[in-house]
Amino acid sequence: MTRQPKLELHHHLEGAAPPAFIRGLAKEKHLDISGIFDAAGNYQYKDFADFLRVYEAATQTLKTPEDYHRLTLAVLEESAKSGVIYCETFLSPDFCGGRDVGAWQDYVAAIRDAAQMAEAQMGITLRGIVTAIRHFGPDKARQTAICAAETAGDFIVGFGLAGDERAGQPADFAWGFDCAHEAGLHLTAHAGEWGGPESVRAVLRDLRVERIGHGVRAIEDLALVDELAESGTVLEVCPGSNIALGLYPNLRAHPIAQLYARGVKLTVSTDDPPFFHTTMTREYENLHEAFDWDEGVFDGFAQTALDAAFCDVDTKAELRKKLETSHA
Ligand SMILES: [Zn+2]
């Protein structure tokens, strides 16, 4: 399953930071974050609150555009090992220059440069989705949307909303989504992870998103599931993340198979892979084991991801060729 070409649409750049890379960076900067690793050197945490603490400690080592350049290369190297040929990653001006447009442009240039190197060396294509952090509030989300609009193009292709789903209402962020949409960016938002089906309805209605990050709790309202299937709205499903954070006890209890059976368009992603002790290959293997899904099902997920990807038509055509040649 490692070699099967994969496309990943739900991925946070900082959340994908390999632990060894973060340890090295902390050492260079004389920061002591040894408490966040287990004996084997992996991230360790006890519960969701502790996860947030570990995540923050790890990401506080990332400061400069140069740090993000190195991070991008380290992350894409890991993704390429899992057979990922295309990845859309969430980027936040909140962490990259404090939402200052000029500073943000420097970070984007650094990340993009690293992405081009990775593409040449490892055959993996990266695109960025600028993401506002919900619990930072609508004012900061406005500034984030302006950063997104200023860098919209062939690398920054989307705008999204992440963070604590229980903070505020999606409608509070409509200005940012309108601004991003006018700049030509595609739209997605986290919903239906910590929030129920109503949170999925709200982002579709108030933010006019094309895809939904997670969205799995739509399963609690079958009328909504049927609406999603009918409209072809794509869910960026991250099974390993949901299980690691305790949303569902195991994959058998996870709604992915039910959503799939009811005709909802799905893709599979890792979210924050090393924090959830997963990779794209592991996600595929676990799904195969739990539901006996064969290669055809996974090819379908890759095809759905390609259709729902936010990149331009030329990039899609190249990716399509890669998928086709893998079957030749
Ligand atoms: Zn996420």
Image (cartoon, rainbow, N blue to C red):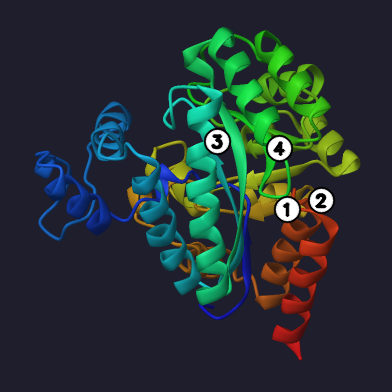
**Which mark lies nearer to you, 1 or 4?**
4
189 over 114 or under it: above or below? above
User: Does residue 278 lie above or below 210 as drawn?
Assistant: below
User: Is 311 or 267 nearer to us in this picture?
Assistant: 311
Q: Nearer the viewer, residue 168 or 194?
A: 168
Between label 1 and label 3, give the one nearer the viewer. 3
Q: Is residue 220 visible?
A: no
Between circles 4 and 2, the one closer to the viewer is 4
- Badge 2 crowding class, 10 Å Cα cut-off, few under 14, some 14 to 19, many 20 or more, is some
Position of residue 285 relative to residue 301, above or below, is below
Distance, label 1 to label 3, CA atoms, is: 39 Å
Residue 28 place in picture, x, y as percent? 14, 49
Residue drawn at 57 percent across, 8 percent down = 139
Distance from label 1 to label 4 (Cα)? Answer: 33 Å
Question: Which of the 4 quarters of the picture holds residue 230?
Answer: top right
| Residue ID for mark 1 | 260
Taking the image as shown, residue 322 lies to the left or right of residue 126, namely right
**Residue 180 coordinates in the image, percent (x, y):** 74, 26
Residue 105 — which label?
A: 3
Which of pointers 4 and 3 lies earlier in the amino acid sequence?
A: 3
Q: Which mark is residue 263?
A: 2
The reply to whether residue 52 is visible in this rendering is yes
Q: CA distance from mark 4 to mark 2?
A: 33 Å
Q: Pick whichever of labels 4 and 2 is earlier in the sequence.
A: 4
- Count residues near mark 1 (Cα–Cα under 10 Å), then give few for <14, some for 14-19, many for 20+: few
Residue type (three-letter) at the residue carrying disc 1: Tyr
Q: Earlier in the sequence, mark 2 or mark 3?
A: 3
Looking at the rendered structure, the secondary structure element under dot 1 is helix
Q: Please, what secondary structure does the residue beneath circle 3 have?
A: helix
| Pointer 1 with pointer 2, Cβ within 8 A | yes
Between marks 4 and 3, how big is the CA–CA gap?
11 Å
Residue at 77%, 30% (x, y): give it: 209
